[in-house]
Image (cartoon, rainbow, N blue to C red):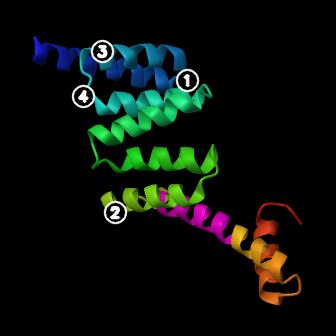
Amino acid sequence: MENENVIKSQEYSGKGADKLNAQDYNGAIEDFNKAIELNPENHGAYNDRGIAKESLKDYQGAIEDYNKAIELEQNISSYYYNRALYKMDIINDYQSAIEDFNKAIELNPNDANSYICRGQALLECAGDDFHKALKMEPNNEEAIFFAGLIDDMHGNV
């Protein structure tokens, strides 16, 4: 019976993934819920349900699912990547996002997107540092230059 549940869980995960790709987020969540009910160890269903929840702006549910996927399986780079995007884009926790991007890169050093997104998070942290330096030394030419460069990137000139 246990093996049968694992197989059925994978079937529901597949259906959920199809619905996720079709942007039927509620339908996808229903299928991922069923997949998890059948096999609570189905880490992929947690990760994909997190993506669907994030798309529906259920941010608390999304981070809980990303965390659970990583708790169950710590060697899949995309789980760290998805959680890092959440941390970067939703809660602006760039330092923590960088840590997750680092882990994603460690697990999959050939994923260009992880490097690009980590670079974006690093730039955000650098921008904060340059602006802090400007508050301490408003005439510091290097701080003015780099803060201006990053502000220009964001269209804040």
Could you say where residue 8 lies in the image, as x and y percent from the top left? 23, 14
Q: Earlier in the sequence, mark 1 or mark 2?
A: 1
Tell whether position 24 is magenta. no
Whole-number angstrom distance, CA of label 1 to CA of label 4: 25 Å
Secondary structure state at the residue bearing disc 1: loop
Can residue 24 be seen by looking at this rendering?
Answer: no
Give amino acid for label 4.
Glu
Dot 2 corresponds to which residue? 106
Residue in the image at 71% along x and 69% along y: 127
Position of residue 90 relative to residue 93, above or below, is above
Tell whether position 121 is magenta. yes
| Magenta stretch in the rendered image | 114-126
Q: Which mark is residue 23?
A: 1
- Foreground mark, 1 or 3, reads 3
Q: Earlier in the sequence, mark 2 or mark 3?
A: 3
Quarter of the picture holding the C terminus = bottom right
